Image (tube, coloured by chain):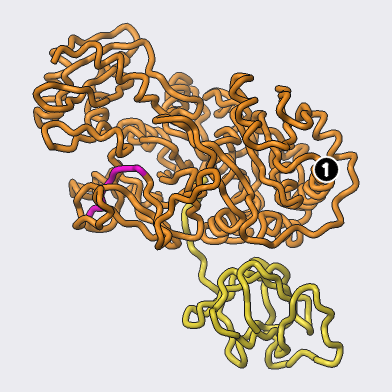
Chain colours: A yellow, B orange
Amino acid sequence: MQLKPGSRLKSQVCDTQVVVVKAPKDDVDLRCGGAPMVDAAVTPDPSVSRDADRSAGSLLGKRYADEELAIELLCSKGGAGSLTIGDTGLGVKGAKALPSSD
Amino acid sequence: MNLMMLLDMAAEAEPDRLALGRRADGLTYGRLKDLAGRAAAWLADQGDNVIYGDVSTPTLPVLLFGSSWAGKPFVPVNFRLAVDRLEALIATQTPAVLVGPQSAQQAISAHSTSSAAKAIAGTVSSDADWSFDDEDVAIVLHTSGTSGAPKPVILRQRHLVGYVLGSVDFLAADPSEATLVSVPPYHIAGMAAILTAVFGGRRLVQLPVFEPTDWIAAVREESITHAMVVPTMLARIIDALIAEGDSSAGLPTLRLLSYGGGRMPIPVIEQAMQLLPHVDFVNAYGLTETSSSVSVLGPDDHRLAVSSDDPAVRARLGSVGRPLPIIELTIRDLDGREVPQGEQGEVWVRGDQVSGEYGSRSSLDSAGWFATKDAGYLDPDGYLFLAGRIDDVIVRGGENLSPGEIEDVLINHPSIKEAAVVGIADVEWGEVPACAVVFEAGESVDTVDVQAWVASHLRSARVPAVVHPMDELPYNDTGKLLRRELKPILQGLHRP
């Protein structure tokens, strides 16, 4: 699917929701729990189920990214499924460890 | 993206954590989100812009988030504005609702902050979703206008959310942490403080009007761990702590104190570090146009600088640190070409948080770079040193002099409390430095002795041609020195 910064997507197989922070130019096969993610407003397909091998979970507030693909997602709701592009897992973007400046 | 997303996530994860106010009666994240939804519904039929003209109140963050929820720009304005200036400003934002102690004919409706708070609490929460359009205008702030008329700076959802996501980790604060905001709402640091505290999960305590003794009392009463101040505030806090004498209770809960929004005199930060050795100091440099900080000098940099024998490392106490990882920063000459490392020029920045948009006009170049109008240079390790606004740099016989460098030397004189240096026209040199000084109580120094003091520390080109004693220097409400007011006074005293 073609992602757009600011758009919201949800998992079809768990509670996970993400907001797109950075979107690649090309289409990507973004999945959660093994099933394709869908627009937050779309009703999930009830026939898909969560892949047990893609169930490490997603965590609220973490940013999931792949630098090579130029994709970054912010997890706005955690869930049981793991975020992947195709079969490749997305890594958690490391803490910035910046001192508070405001 | 939308600012509401930041609050919504915090409210989802930690609905019962205190978000705002005192430990005894503060608002939780859940309640803050609830009130933002009520504010969104209340604002729905009240004009296009939300103007807030009061000091910091609990209604401020409610209206800020509520405005984003309702898709309306939030416009905090100086509560000390004269009525005619307020009317003129609202006229550019109409149709607008005004919340604050003043009323204005240009506003389609005006409410005191307390009546707005009551009306919001009594409104049924919005059941509409907030917009996720990155281009929506979130906040409009007016530049401080030290060198000209104030300009409205447009900060879109993508700038502010980009800044928060890039500089704060979600709920990284311990629930015991609390941040004290004492800069006014119409200052970018006042807005950024709300956003970063909410996303970081740090309780926000507001000090409506800054007075050093009130600030110290608030830190003690509310066990404040973090705070941001402008340099003039820090100097006054230090004086007030010293005045407490040996019986001072100190500031034992304070862990981090960041400062910015103006040039910090080195003697002041050195004294602060000595007095508060347990506190981490952070120097932050940013502009309204960049959604707050673009570079920071961290606690370790501060400690290394004061303890180092290496002059280059010691000098870093006067630097604003290194650019944030999400910011690109270069130094360019007047033609826009990058200068060799170490040379002074204009600071340019690029990044998600950089707006550079005034009214309906973007000042970014075609590649997205913003010229800050600040002069500066980078040292070999990438630390940024600022030399004042481009317009304030003094060009004496082709040599660039930085007012700040001369001011630091003046302030180090035991009898000089404050100093301001500006360039004035001179027949021989084109421009020469001149200074206004405020002496310590009951003391004074002759002009020739002030000049001799500067000459003993700096090259002779930097010796002020005029030394003018004043009772106080002209500052604006947020502690920025108004050099343009000094120039004609000092020029009048110069016989070229």
* Left or right position of B318 against B370: left
Asked if residue B93 is among those painted magenta in the image, a careful observer would answer no
Residue B207 position (above or below residue A2): above
Q: Position of residue B420 (x, y in %)?
A: 30, 24
Q: Nearer the viewer, residue B140 or B14?
A: B140
* Extent of the magenta region: B373-379
For residue A8, side relative to residue B291 (left or right): right
Location of the C terminus of chain B (image quadrant): top left
**Foreground pick, B69 / B359:** B359
Q: Is residue B216 above or below residue B308?
A: above
Residue lying at 39% horizontally and 34% vertically, measured from the top left:
B272
Q: Secondary structure at mark 1?
A: loop
Q: Classify residue B206 as left or right of residue B461.
A: right
Quarter of image, res B488? top left
What residue is pinned by disc 1?
B45
Q: Is residue B378 magenta?
A: yes
Residue B211 in the image: state x and y as whole percent: 55, 23
Quadrant where the N terminus of chain B is found in the figure: bottom right
Front position in the image: A56 or B323: B323
